[in-house]
Image: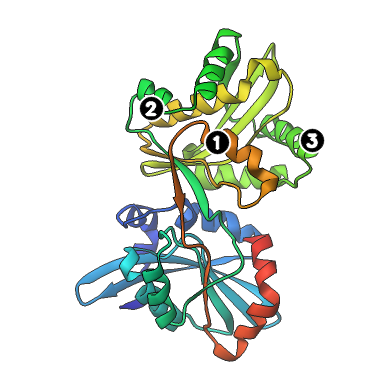
């Protein structure tokens, strides 16, 4: 297999082309590259092919990690069949040029001993750093509403109906300041950092009508928020939270359900709740998500390989943590 830079026409058609791959992903889209360009990442797009034609695609983001040195990162790529992944990463490594400390990728490939061994034969090894979530929850939206509800935990189903009976209102909005105010409340309560309002404005600019913001209200008070982005027949729930107010009415359960129904109406077949906990600190969030049913998907995790071999120790001993914090 070989990797070559996409032609101008292929780069122009990139978002359409990734929908033709085995596993198209939001993080391989031109919108994501545009968003990340604000934090000094620049995108290169590669076509993976052999004598039989195109075998996959890869959007690689590059960023300086030290004077004169860069790191290459393919978020959720390359987009190819699982069996082709070792050859695809080796081809990308050969195609990349410049003073690169390494190539990192975290494809949505299921974990298997066979794949790990095949990757090792191509000098690709698992990284100790998780950049994107290694586990997630996927909801199959090809099912009707009654089937989806019946697959949920009993309490989740009851709380959705309780919120409906008690007058919790949900709506979509384009008011990002309103969304961000609610998110700040959640972040301050639970003590985690969030992006500033400009980031969400850039996200809206990058994804336009494919981005959806939903809010839950009780008596005119915003109490819940979700931000979801669509690509093809899949949607990713990237940000959200509940203010902590009006707990008895269970507003966030209804908001999540209404988000599922909206995405289904828009043709989404798989709804990704964007990550499950890797540690005890987020076990409560994971338990809440699992109440909605669905399938737990576990991916192989981040992979790393040297590009400029003498520079690779700089990645292993210094740049890993920096990437995890910025990607």
Q: Can see residue 255?
A: yes
Query: What mark, if any, has residue 265 been given in the picture?
Result: 2
Q: Is residue 116 above or below residue 156?
A: below
Image location (x, y in percent) of residue 36 = 59, 58
Q: For the residues carrying marks 1 and 2, which lies nearer the camera in this image?
A: 1
The location of residue 141, given as percent across then percent down, is 37, 33
* Residue 247 location, quadrant: top right
Residue 94: image quadrant is bottom left
Q: Residues within 10 Å of mark 2 (few under 14, many from 20)?
A: few
Disc 3 packing (10 Å; few <14; some 14–19; many ≥20) = few
Q: Earlier in the sequence, mark 3 or mark 2?
A: 3
How many neighbours does mark 1 have within 10 angstroms: few (below 14), some (14-19), or many (20 or more)?
A: many
The residue lying toward the viewer, choosing from 221 and 198, is: 221
Q: Residue 289 shows which numbered tag?
A: 1
Q: Is residue 176 above or below residue 58?
A: above
Quadrant where the C terminus sits is bottom right
- The CA span between labels 1 and 2 is 21 Å
- Quote the CA–CA distance across marks 3 and 2: 34 Å
Disc 3 to disc 1, C-alpha distance: 20 Å
Q: Badge 3 is on which residue?
A: 189
- Is 242 on the left or on the right of 95, as rendered? right
Task: Answer with the quarter of the image where residue 323 lies.
Answer: bottom right
Name the spot of residue 153 as percent of width and height, x first.
49, 27
Q: Is residue 91 above or below residue 128?
A: below
């Amino acid at each position: 297999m070989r990797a070559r830079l996409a032609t101008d026409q292929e780069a122009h058609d990139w978002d359409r082309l990734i929908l033709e791959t085995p596993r198209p992903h939001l993080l391989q889209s031109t919108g994501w590259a545009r968003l990340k360009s604000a934090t000094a990442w620049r995108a290169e797009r590669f076509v993976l092919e052999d004598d039989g034609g195109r075998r996959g695609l890869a959007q690689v983001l590059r960023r300086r990690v030290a004077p004169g040195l860069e790191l290459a990162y393919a978020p959720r790529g390359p987009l190819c069949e699982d069996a082709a992944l070792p050859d695809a990463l080796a081809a990308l490594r050969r195609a990349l040029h410049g003073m690169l400390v390494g190539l990192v990728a975290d494809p949505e490939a299921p974990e298997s001993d066979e794949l790990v061994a095949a990757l090792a034969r191509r000098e690709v090894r698992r990284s100790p750093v998780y950049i994107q979530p290694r586990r997630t929850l996927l909801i199959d939206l090809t099912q009707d509403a009654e089937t989806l509800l019946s697959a949920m935990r009993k309490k989740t189903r009851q709380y959705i109906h309780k919120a409906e009976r008690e007058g919790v209102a949900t709506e979509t909005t384009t008011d990002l300041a309103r969304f961000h105010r609610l998110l700040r409340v959640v972040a301050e309560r639970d003590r985690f950092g969030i992006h500033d309002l400009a980031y969400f404005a850039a996200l809206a600019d990058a994804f336009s009508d494919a981005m959806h913001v939903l809010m839950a209200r009780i008596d005119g008070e915003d109490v819940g928020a979700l931000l979801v982005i669509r690509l093809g027949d899949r949607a990713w729930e990237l940000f959200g939270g509940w203010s902590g107010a009006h707990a008895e009415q269970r507003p966030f359960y209804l908001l999540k359900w209404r988000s599922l129904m909206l995405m289904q109406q828009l043709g989404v077949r798989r709804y990704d709740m964007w990550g499950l906990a890797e540690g005890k600190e987020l076990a409560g969030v994971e338990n809440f998500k699992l109440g909605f049913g669905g399938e737990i998907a576990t991916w192989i995790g981040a992979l790393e390989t040297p590009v400029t071999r003498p520079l690779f120790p700089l990645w292993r001993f210094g740049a890993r943590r920096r990437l995890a914090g910025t990607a």
